[in-house]
Image: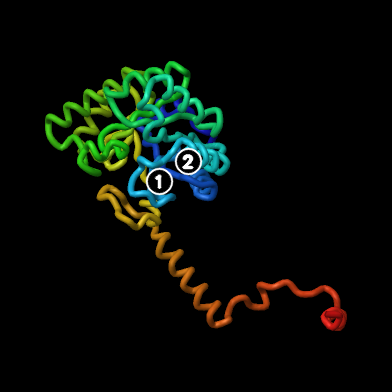
Amino acid sequence: MAKKKSILDLQKMKESGEKAAWVTAYDFPTASFVEEAGMDMILVGDSLGMVVKGYKGTVPVTMEDCIAHCQDVRRGAPKTFVIGDMPFGSYQVSDAKAVENATRFLKEADMDAIKLEGGRRIASQIQAISDAGIVVFGHIGLTPQSSSQLGGFKAQGLTTDSARELIKDAQAVEDSGARALLLEAVPPEVTEFITKKLTIPVYSIGAGLPCDGQLLICGDMLGMFQAFTPKFVKKYANVAEVEINAFKEYIKEVKEEKFPTDDHVYHIKDSAEDFEKLFNEF
């Protein structure tokens, strides 16, 4: 496979017009499949709270959760650019705490970058983490960690006033030292403007085509997460249906004594007579 990408490669992709494809992953097997497919990047998102742990949102996810899953993903995808997602509460307290927690992603999980949510309100944290020598990905638009302030999981930038605020946030993210920006649930017109305005790569998750690449949640695109499916998701598989049907077939065969067959058991190496003698000893 191709060599692992760096932030410089991602910047060159923007300049040449090559789109970047990335997806979330939270475990070793998924990460290994993603790397084998040739994905440009992996995000170990705090969406693991919903996809893996069954939470209603991302807020309960802890640093320990994120670090553990980042370690699993790195083992599965050693040659892929991987971003660790900073969970709620890990950077809002202070610049110093933000740098401390961002550092953990690199030291303990061998991440290539971190991502955090917010624009102007967290400009100082982005600057501090960047100044510490860590690659920062910004994230604005629909920011799940602050969804309660947004009134739920709602698209952003739908009016000129809110679009103006998004553009100001995007500029602040770049000015603070971030090396890339993720836009979530934003109209394509706003996405295109921001992508052309910023010099850093601008990526979309539900923000349309005119940008530098696309991100999807693996649980959504593979049909694994069934609680709800965002409008912007395209399902490329229905893994849940495959697994449920497999489990049903297994249950049926166990009940009907069709599994295991002779092909699935280990046979004795000594003669049956020897084992008969052994059994007679008891």
Q: Is residue 1 visible?
A: no
At 49% from the left and 43% from the top, the residue drawn is 38
Q: Nearer the viewer, residue 277 or 262?
A: 277
The N terminus lies in quadrant: top right
Q: What element carries label 1?
A: helix
The reply to whether callout 2 and callout 1 are in contact (CB within 8 Å) is: yes
Q: How crowded is mark 1: few (under 14 residues within 10 Å), some or many (20 or more)?
A: many
In percent of width and height, residue 151 lies at: 20, 41
At 38% from the left and 57% from the top, the residue drawn is 223
The C terminus lies in quadrant: bottom right
Label 2: which residue?
Answer: 65
Left or right of 133, for residue 117: left
Q: Is residue 229 visible?
A: yes
**Dividing the picture into quarters, in which one does residue 9 lie?**
top left
Amino acid under disc 2:
Asp
| Mark number, residue 270 | none
